[in-house]
Image: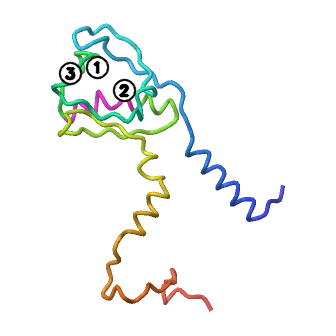
Amino acid sequence: MTTSYSEAVDNIFHVHEQAKNWTTGAINIPVATSLDNDHPQIINLSETIDQGKNVPKPSKRSDDNCYWLPQSLSENHDKFRKEKIHPIFAQACFWAGFVVHGEYETRHKCIQFECMMSKYHDEEKKKKYAANRPRKVKNPEIPPEPRDSRREGQRGL
């Protein structure tokens, strides 16, 4: 099957647009029933993602606004979080089809997980950032010159 260059570019653009609206199925995570009750329950993590809510302050956390890990996972230091807590979330998300990054936020005293795609694949945000970024040049009054990516010594005849 022969396709033209413009058809191939259109297909790539279409796949890219579809990827922006990709959704996942259930991401099941085992958690404790409440802060005081370690009886396990399964929650669908995808129902809690992107709800536009900030992490409650430690003094405001309760069974009504938080889910709790079992007491066996109550340690809070880098090695324990890396070896025991991160894998619970990372593996569940991996099996749902994406990769997450978890980072402990000392200010909020919690681990913030974020999809890796959200960090690296927002072209519109990247273009806005580049357009608003000041140029670091000797004389900003001179417009930029297009550059040849090949080095002088590598030019063909």
Residue 111 point in image, percent of width and height: 27, 34
Residue 60 drawn above or below residue 109: above
Q: Quadrant of the N terminus?
A: bottom right
Query: Which residue type does callout 3 highlight?
Result: Ser
Which residue carries the number 2 mark? Answer: 88
Residue 108 point in image, percent of width and height: 20, 36
Q: 25 left or right of 132? A: right
The quadrant holding residue 107 is top left
Q: Residues in magenta?
A: 78-90
Residue 126 drawn above or below residue 136: above
Q: Are marks 2 and 3 in contact (CB under 8 Å)?
A: no
Which residue carries the number 3 mark? Answer: 74
Disc nearer the start of the sequence (3/1): 1
The quadrant holding residue 112 is top left
Query: Residue shown at 18%/39% (left/top)?
Result: 106
Q: Which mark is residue 154?
A: none
Q: Quadrant of the C terminus?
A: bottom right
Q: Are marks 3 and 1 in contact (CB under 8 Å)?
A: yes
